[in-house]
Image (cartoon, rainbow, N blue to C red):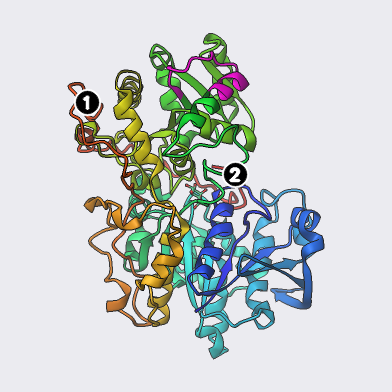
Amino acid sequence: MKILYVTSEAVPFCKTGGLADVAGSLPPALAEQGAEVAVVLPLYQRVRDRFGSQLKFECYDYVDLAWRHSYCGLFSLEKDGVTWYFLDNEQYFSRGTLYGQADDGERFAFFSRAVVRMLDHFRFWPEVIHCNDWQSALVPIYLKDDGVREDRYRSIKTVVTIHNIEYQGRYNPYVLGDLFGLDAGWAQDGTMLMDGDANLLKGAILCADAVNAVSPTYANELKMPYFAHRMEGIMRRCSNKLSGVLNGIDMKLYDPRTDQRILKNFSQEDMTGKDDCKAELQRMVGLREEAHTPVVAMVSRLVSHKGLDLICEVLHDMMELPMQLVVLGTGDQRYEEFFHWAAQQYPGRMSVRLDYNEDLSMAIYAGADLFLMPSKSEPCGLSQMIAMRYGTVPIVRETGGLKDTVQPCESWRDAGNGFSFANYSSGDMLHVIREAVYLYKDYPDVFGRLRQRAMACDFSWARSAREYLRIYATITGQAWPIHSDTHRAADTPAEEPTPAETPAPAEETISAETPAPAEETISAETPAPVEETTPAGETVSEEKKPAKKTRKTASKAAGKTAKTEKKTEKKATSKKGTAGKKKSAE
Ligand code: GLC
């Protein structure tokens, strides 16, 4: 199967947020499973600066977009079984930042138009083009537009992945012709029209053969006004081709047994290194060196949807608990000022670094005991998975990918891999933090086993790659050998936990509208498949002791999941012209 993956950023070349992590890991994981994969990206200045010497010049051509006739160079690089293509146009991409420019619409229209224009020059004619977010949303639209005139464009199937629906690419419809080279009919018939704007993402969702969100829960949430930024109607209309595929993390890069970025390595079998990492973290950030005080950590952009209001409301109650708090991140001034002020109230017990610092973030993942993510919404979230890998137990709100990756602790039966709360309420969050802190302090054995379960979770990309391959197979009408033992052997390294043991909470499946799995419905007309969605789960280590009942269990959390989520209707905040807003780090 030949897949062309289109993205505006990818690790290690250029990154502003989680999309780059996904685009850096998923294509190699697809290749590992036998697909032929090429990725195409803009050749930004920073890519030229850092990777210029490794790039091979392939050819150049000209791209016609409305009245513009622009140069487009094609460079390539082979890495991890994937061909990485870079489209060059200095006028559009030789800039200091990736997004946030006044002409972002024109820049990414050029990029999308160029992807379609340069198809002849890639090493294969793709069967599937997989686009991501608004920056490449015009690709399925251009393919449909060109397909009217040329059959070969109609042979290509398209997938659109929504990483964050807040960013839609909204423009005045009068620019359709001039900026995007599209006939006004695209807006007049409603395909690209949304609240009076030409909306690139809406057009892509309607034109694509399959649409997916980055977690099953987010895929469902997108049908609700609270989460969908006015797109709920479209998402509901497209629910037959909508699915949720949980992201993974790079299990080799984030491996506490081998990671050179942390002070001491450790593993499920030997956790002593983690104690050293904790002491080192406390020293680094100026917390008292207390081995038995749980360190609660946050590594986050300091923006509202990360749930920071909850922390502002109850910070002082939190700090009455026998815990320490470390916060790393940058963002909105009001949160930066709050955390800066708050840290001064609790010297030695609370530490705040208003910074984006990879090294410190690794020290935190490795050294902390609990990882707090009370997000209002979270399409997938990667930090909670990284934290779990390093034995830092997550405390999350049950939304999007957080809900799909964290199952609440039920200590009476040794189940769950973290702590969670359902309502967006500071009281509920505080309650769960208290549970976590006291479980750590009063029942170290139980907490230790919980930590082991968190570390044993399988967040490998192989599982996501298999789900994407199933989607590709369905829309192209191909059978794909997904369940063969050979593949299972290939994607599950011997030392990794076996996904087979992964528990799959029933309610996590995407929805009743879920179409049948690929094998049963292989037809080009068939909507995107949604395989029974298995949230990343835990495997239980062999050393695990039998479940020990404790009088004081830490887990009323299970009961809490039943609480109804209070859905505060949120005004849509998307504004015209915000399309190019920077998608920054998680
Ligand atoms: C966006 C989402 C984040 C997700 C990432 C990768 O940044 O906000 O939750 O993990 O995309 O899909």
- 10 Å crowding of disc 2: few (<14), some (14-19), many (20+): few
Name the foreground residue: 445 vs 236: 445
Q: Name the amino acid, label 1.
A: Thr
The residue under the point 32% across, 19% down is: 438
The residue under the point 60% across, 73% down is: 182
Residue denoted by label 1:
553
The residue under the point 35% across, 23% down is: 440
Name the foreground residue: 558 vs 90: 558
Residue denoted by label 2:
584
- 10 Å crowding of disc 1: few (<14), some (14-19), many (20+): some
Taking the magenta stretch, the answer to whether it contains residue 129 is no
Label of residue 407 in the image: none
For the question of whether residue 409 can be seen, the reply is yes
Q: Is residue 196 left or right of residue 119?
A: left
* Residue 323 percent across, percent down from the top left: 43, 17
* Residue 454 percent across, percent down from the top left: 38, 40
Q: Name the amino acid, label 2.
A: Ser
Label whose residue precedes the other's in the sequence (2 or 1): 1
The residue under the point 46% across, 39% down is: 267
Q: Is residue 229 above or below residue 183?
A: above
Based on the displayed image, in which of its 4 quarters is residue 340 positioned? top right
Per the image, label 1 sits on a secondary structure element best described as loop
Span shown in magenta: 279-295
Q: Is residue 158 above or below residue 417?
A: below
Q: Is residue 504 left or right of residue 311?
A: left
